[in-house]
Image (cartoon, rainbow, N blue to C red):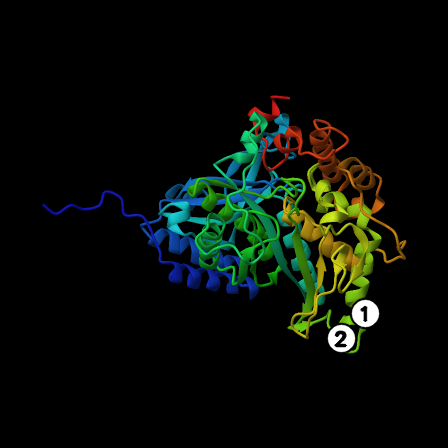
Amino acid sequence: MTTTPIRDFLEISYDELEALNLEAKEQRLNRTPADTLREQRMKYLADEKRIKAVTVCFTDLEGRLHMLDYDKKFLLKSEDNLTFDGSSIRGFSRQSESDLRLGIDWAAFYWLPADVFGPGKVLVFGEVLERDGSPYAADLRSVLKRFTTDLFESKGYTLNLANEIEGFIFKGRSAEQRFVEGSAMEFVSTSGYYHSLPGDPLRSFIDAAAEAQRAMGFANEKDHPEVAPSQFEMNYSYTEATIAADQVQLYKLLCRQVAYQMDMTASFLPKPVTGINGSGMHTNMSVSEKGKNLFFDAKGREELSTMGWDFIQRILTHALDICLVLNPSVNAYRRLDPHYEAPNQIKASPVDRGSMVRIPIGNSKSARIEVRSIAPDVNPYLAIYTLFKTGLEGTAEAVADDAILPDNVYDAITHFQNSEFSEQVLSPDVRDRYAELKLASADRCPRRLGSTIKTSEVQFHHEVTNQYLWNKF
């Protein structure tokens, strides 16, 4: 007897996925009109019968990625009238004004590896809107997108970015949430930089995650274990800033999902284990105009242009103002420890990896600056927007030779709240909301970090905590 599969959901080979996602990425880079992309994507969804659901995702003020799965047929009928309860999202609307709208950015459309996300689904990024359809101030993705669009339209600038995101792999699922039970996070491998065996658990994770990453159009360059045990990094090519920020969220989502499938946990805590190197998110930045890299000057110091050096000086000038944005958790300040290659010195250098900003070796295509004092648990949209706005519009002043970044979150919160510049970057309301969220988590943790990881700094970390954990205080 011949049997017909009950379910016939979309599954695409990795090669075809990569081609589809790279083509969609090229449309974004070419700034294909939004209406054109909306029409293309909606026709595709209507014609492709094997798609059952569309995952629409957005990011809250602290940087957590939220995902809503919409039935495809419902979405096609209601894509201009999607709503959600904003009061359930930390840092968004209050209960008395809870409903928010969710628009769809059809340009940010991804075909998904079925073995990672399940068959029959595609993913698209959403834009959080007020009830009247206007942009929601605490949706930093929309803020970044408007900022980059305005600069392109007014000056012809394209903001380029590549992130080097480090993380750890630990044994077992939900290792961070189980830390509150007294369960130490265990390494899956003690092999180190570049020399883990091809088949060990860390290398197996990296291979699987990098393959999925490549299929989603990241344009991979290299991947490897990092210095600390069970630490990893997977590098990919630079791209336009908003796309790059989306890729940060997808990178972490992919890593967490692949690790979960392998009975492990991917952690992006900046310093989940003391006594070894922490994790950073080194952020490489440049600005181009009609394909010309404006940060390159063959005759400039370190072959960096005056514009590039001015960009650096503005970031250094405002280092204390924006430190909380770049290092948003109690745990992040453990990483800013000079004994472990910590980039806590407010200076720039081509060689000193303790500097907040490094100037890598480059040429007319690759000349860039690298901001090193940025943790992997940031809100990528907030951090990237803040860095570019600071570098292009901030004040450039002299900085003391011995200036360093704060060694605790309370000092960072104080600098942020007392800063006139932070009010220029964010609206007063959003700035205050962000500071309140950071203070609420900090107040649940000891003021002095000490030499061991405290349960509270993991339990109440914005990427770890949930309603159940928060209410155990």
Secondary structure at badge 1 equals helix
Q: Residue at x 18, y 46 (%)?
A: 4
* Residue 270, position as x, y percentages in the image: 65, 43
Q: Which residue is mark 2?
A: 297
* Residue 104, position as x, y percentages in the image: 52, 48
Vertical arrangement, residue 56 with respect to residue 459, above or below: below
Quarter placement of the N terminus: top left
Nearest the camera: 227 or 464? Answer: 227
Q: Which residue is mark 1?
A: 306
Q: Earlier in the sequence, mark 1 or mark 2?
A: 2
> Which of the 4 quarters of the picture holds residue 236?
bottom right
Quarter placement of the C terminus: top right
Decide: marks 1, 2 in contact (CB < 8 A)?
A: yes
Few, some or many residues within 10 Å of mark 1 (<14, 14–19, 20+): some
Q: Residue furthest left?
A: 1
Nearest the camera: 244 or 141? Answer: 244
Q: Residue at x 64, y 49 (%)?
A: 381
> Which of the 4 quarters of the picture holds residue 276?
top right
Relative horizontal placement of residue 67, taking residue 391 as reference (left or right): left
